[in-house]
Amino acid sequence: MDNEELYDDIQEIKTALAITSLVAVYCLSMVLRFVSAHIEWKIICSSIGFMIVSAVDATLFLHLMRLKKEYKNIPENSK
């Protein structure tokens, strides 16, 4: 993978990470809202959504760390 492709992939992962983080925060706020309203089925659905989005978020974060490590190991003369 060349330098430009790697940089583009890192930027795409950062964007996806930001979007999924916002969705996770929204899901968590819905869980807290429905807990106070005592609506069980909505609590379950929003909790499942939060867990799925958090898993995707964690996967994206690990992928970002791997790409940054790979980007750091590119020799200076090829940049």
Image (cartoon, rainbow, N blue to C red):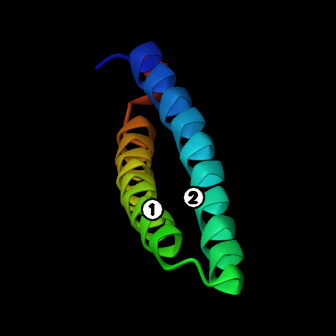
Residue 76 in the figure: left or right of residue 59: right
Q: What residue type is labelled 1?
A: Ser
Numbered label tally: 2
Q: Which amino acid does label 2 sit on?
A: Ala
* Residue lying at the far left of the rendered structure: 1
Mark pair 2, 1: CA separation: 6 Å
Q: Which residue occupies the foreground of this view, 77 or 64?
A: 64
- Please state the horizontal and vertical placement of residue 75, each as a whole percent of the image: 39, 30
**Which residue is disc 1 drawn over?**
54
Q: Do the residues bearing badges 2 and 1 touch, measured as CB atoms within 8 Å?
A: yes
- Please state the horizontal and vertical placement of residue 45, each as a whole percent of the image: 44, 64
Query: Regarding mark 2 in the picture, which secondary structure is present there?
Result: helix
Query: Which residue is drawn at the image coordinates 44% and 55% (left, top)?
Result: 53
Query: Which residue is drawn at the image coordinates 35% and 40% (left, top)?
Result: 70
Q: How crowded is mark 2: few (under 14 residues within 10 Å), some or many (20 or more)?
A: many
- In which quadrant of the rendered image does the N terminus lie? top left
Going from N to C along the chain, the mark reached first, 2 or 1, is: 2
- Please state the horizontal and vertical placement of residue 52, each as a whole percent of the image: 37, 58
Q: Residues within 10 Å of mark 1 (few under 14, many from 20)?
A: some
- Please state the horizontal and vertical placement of residue 14, each as a whole percent of the image: 56, 38
Give me the disc on residue 72: none
Query: Which residue is drawn at the image coordinates 45% and 43% (left, top)?
Result: 68
Q: Is residue 5 above or below residue 72?
A: above
Q: Based on the displayed image, in which of its 4 quarters is residue 58 positioned? A: bottom left
Query: Regarding mark 1 in the picture, which secondary structure is present there?
Result: helix
Give me the disc on residue 24: 2
Residue 54 in the figure: left or right of residue 32: left
